[in-house]
Amino acid sequence: MSREHIGSLSPIIRRIRLQLLCIRAVNRLYDRWPTIGILRHLRASVKPPLIRRPPNAEAYRSKLDSLMSDGLENVGCYMCGNKKATPVGSKEGLSIVRCNDCALLYVSPRIPERRLAELYDSSYWFERMQVHGYASILERVTWDYWDAFDRIREIREFRTQGRFLDIGCSNGALVLRASQEGFCAFGYELDQFIAMIAGRISGRPVFTSDPLLLEEGESLDGGWDVISMYDVFEHFYNPRRELSRVRRVLRQKGLIVLETFRTDPPSFSEDPIKHEDTKPAEHIYMYQERHLEELFVAARFRILSRRYPAGPGHSRIRYYLEPA
């Protein structure tokens, strides 16, 4: 999908927005009368399917080859600095190792950080999704919007209004839902084409320039009351730096919602290479729960709540954090 297709997207996005209106209407009825059986059945009947396809490992191969062509960089353990690690295996031509001291799983050698804009261009949301058997960014809008109802319900347990920033907002489904629930919502995406899609779907501003770009001592007029990062943290090359930057633009009573995966459950630890979250071109650090919480405490955040969206035995973990 290229920028030349922008004009052809208009009817697709109009159809998507009509679908989202129907989903919203059904969920609003259910929220108002959750005990009425027919509404439970209606809600279940209109729930969008999560599209999955057979993975196509060759769909993104030429892009990966290009990204790795000018050299990979060797790194040590991000958590403890140890340079000694034990090989775990390889995937997509990249090696995964385990730190001999703190057991962090990480990718070394890895794609250099300077190539990230190319990695996360618009092809990531189309061709790259095929590698994992996932739906494209447009095919999954209705699913993401449906999921956003539960995400915003949970966020409202902690904050109910204010300036809301969704970092890595993808198709803008969460930005749309947050704005419908009274937040002044914005999104952020690296690629201009993807940001355009997110803005058209959400009807809200979506940044491509970095909304956290503050030097030490600067301040942002207003700041953010809620910053959400779903499936973003594992992509950071320097998570301490990013947490520090987030803290500087977050209001004192602000909230961070951070969802990622952890390597503690047996479903991951028994065979890390085969796990679906092991994507070494993207997920350069694969944390245990204790690693994540060490980073949060060091960045002066307090953990308000720790949740397991898919159950305690699953790798998914969601944190609600506020400045300590």
Image (tube, rainbow, N blue to C red):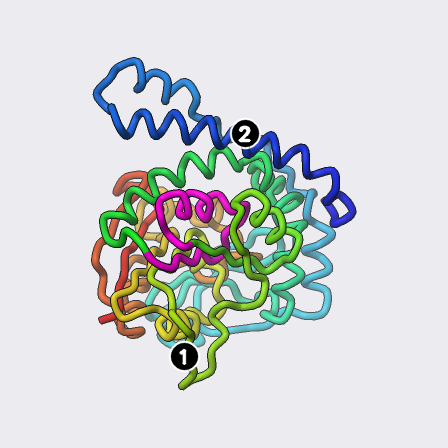
Tell me the magenta residue range.
162-184
What amino acid is found at the position of numbered circle 2 in the picture?
Leu
Question: In which quadrant will I find the N terminus?
Answer: top right
What amino acid is found at the position of numbered circle 1 in the picture?
Ser
The numbered mark, 2 or 1, whose residue comes first in the sequence reads 2
Residue bearing mark 1: 219
Question: In which quadrant will I find the C terminus?
Answer: bottom left
Instruction: Tell me, for residue 19, which label it has, or none.
Output: none
The residue lying at 49 percent from left, 60 percent from top is: 235
Q: Position of residue 113 (x, y in %)?
A: 58, 70
Who is closer to the viewer here, 173 or 24? 24
Residue bearing mark 2: 18
Who is closer to the viewer here, 184 or 191? 184
* SS of the residue under disc 1: loop
Residue 35 can be seen, yes or no: yes
- Looking at the picture, does residue 203 appear above or below residue 65? above
Label 2 CA crowd tier, 10 Å (few <14, some 14–19, many 20+): few
The residue lying at 32 percent from left, 42 percent from top is: 314
Q: Residue furthest bottom?
A: 217
How many marks can you see?
2
- Looking at the picture, does residue 180 appear above or below residue 188? above
